[in-house]
Amino acid sequence: MPEKATMQAAEEDLREGKSPSTAAGEFVREEMDHIREGKHGARNSKQAIAIGLSKARRAGIPLGPPSEKTTLPETRRKAARDTEKGQANPQTGEEGHSKRGHARLTALKKEPQGAASHEALSKQAKSAARKRGQHVHRSAA
């Protein structure tokens, strides 16, 4: 469940006209904070980011589907399901945990906390930028 402050920050970003991915960044930030606080862990930074994006989709943030060439079909199906769920009935943060939700949290608590370290996030960002190529960086500059 997203925290109320995260929902408000994401809604404010959307109101200001920022892109949906910027609003989704609030959910990823929340996820990193949870890992750093020790609420749960993640196998790697990519998993932590994916959890945050999934929360954003379920909260009603209109994110696009993941790219077809870099993701598995099951990941795209999960993202589509999260988007549908978020558009139909956005999660606001008041619901409790189901049995499956408890199992998910129990599994995540067994994962290491290193995925949210500055070093791990830096490594993830650099590798993602490398995959995008130099033409993207030149156009951004």
Image (cartoon, rainbow, N blue to C red):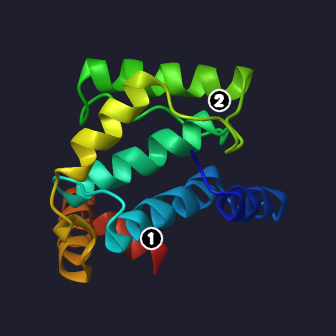
**Residue, x 84% and y 58% (percent of image)?**
15
Q: Is residue 91 left or right of residue 47?
A: right
Label 2 sits on residue: 86
Counting residues from the start of the chain, the first of labels 2 and 1 encountered is 2
Which numbered disc, 2 or 1, marks the residue closer to the eye? Answer: 2
For residue 65, say whether it is visible. Answer: yes
Q: Is residue 40 left or right of residue 4?
A: left
Residue type (three-letter) at the residue carrying disc 1: Ser
116 relative to 90, above or below: below
SS class, disc 2: helix
Determine which quarter of the picture holds residue 72.
Answer: top left
Residue type (three-letter) at the residue carrying disc 2: Gly
Q: Position of residue 47 (x, y in %)?
A: 26, 49
128 relative to 87, above or below: below
Q: Position of residue 138 (x, y in %)?
A: 37, 75
Question: Depth check: 97 or 36 in front?
Answer: 97
Label 1 sits on residue: 139
SS class, disc 1: helix
Mark 2 and 1 residues: CB-CB less than 8 Å, in contact? no
- Label 1 neighbour load within 10 Å: few <14, some 14-19, many 20+: few
**Residue, x 26% and y 66% (percent of image)?**
129
The N terminus, quarter of image: top right
Distance between the alpha carbons at the discs numbered 2 and 1: 33 Å
**Residue, x 37% and y 72% (percent of image)?**
37
Question: Depth check: 122 or 19 in front?
Answer: 122
